[in-house]
Image (spheres, grey):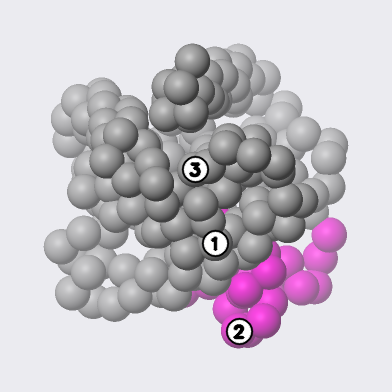
Amino acid sequence: MTIVGTAIAGVVAILAGTGILMGICQLSYNYAPNIRLTSRDITGARNYWLIIALNIVATFVTYIGAILLFSDFLIRSGPTLWYDAIIAILLYDLAYYWMHRAMHTKFLMRHLHGWHHRCKHPTAFDGLYQRPHETVLALCLLLACIAVVGPVSITSFVLVISFHTVLNMLDHANLRTGMKWFDHLMYAHDLHHSKRDVNFGLTPLWDHVFGTTHKRLLQTKT
């Protein structure tokens, strides 16, 4: 298999695996109320399943299209450098933090990001309820960060995509797992959806750096 084919196969496997995990998280939320973090609250979600489907299609098309068109900038053959994936993830988390903050300006919240915040206390499926071009924008930012660091090895590329995809899904899962770090992430993003002006990062790192961590996360253990 060519390097491009391997990258596409890796992305498809990641997305399929995350889809299965998403289904497990949603079923856990629906049928195990004792592990719910908060009660789901979604208002005005028109065409819910159509929007979910469009975002799934947008994700596949963006990743596969980018690999086919820009593989020279994204992936390479050869050994894996241990720091490639780490740098790409940190760079993306920083870039996404500021993009996400920008989306909370009045104009972009009204015309772009507001759909996603119709979910006050989202669950795993609700993470895909947003305008599809917002999904494309976030994925293009991720791919651009990989290109800035890269081209990276197939292993690093798959690790970065895996980290982003799984963490973004878990952020919205609204569950208590008993694992403090995962529970912290889910609680932080639940607070972001309900309070809006806090916890913008994919990880807690840049919220701590720039002082946008919600006070409950600083004062209590979840």
Q: Is residue 189 toward the left or the right of residue 60 in the image?
A: right
- On residue 75, which mark appears? 3
Residue shown at 40%/67% (left/top)?
Answer: 100
Q: Quadrant of residue 90?
A: bottom right
Residue type at the position of mark 3: Ile
Front residue of this view, candidates 165 and 23: 165
Tell me residue 59's x, y (percent): 33, 35
Asked if the stretch drawn in magenta spans residue 218, the answer is: yes
- On residue 210, which mark appears? 2
Residue shown at 76%/51% (left/top)?
Answer: 82
Q: Is residue 131 toward the left or the right of residue 122 in the image?
A: left
Residue shown at 34%/75% (left/top)?
Answer: 102
Tell me residue 210's x, y (percent): 60, 84
Asked if the stretch drawn in magenta spans residue 198, the answer is: yes
Of labels 2 and 3, earlier in sequence is 3
Residue shown at 34%/53% (left/top)?
Answer: 140
Extent of the magenta region: 195-221
The residue beneath circle 1 is 149
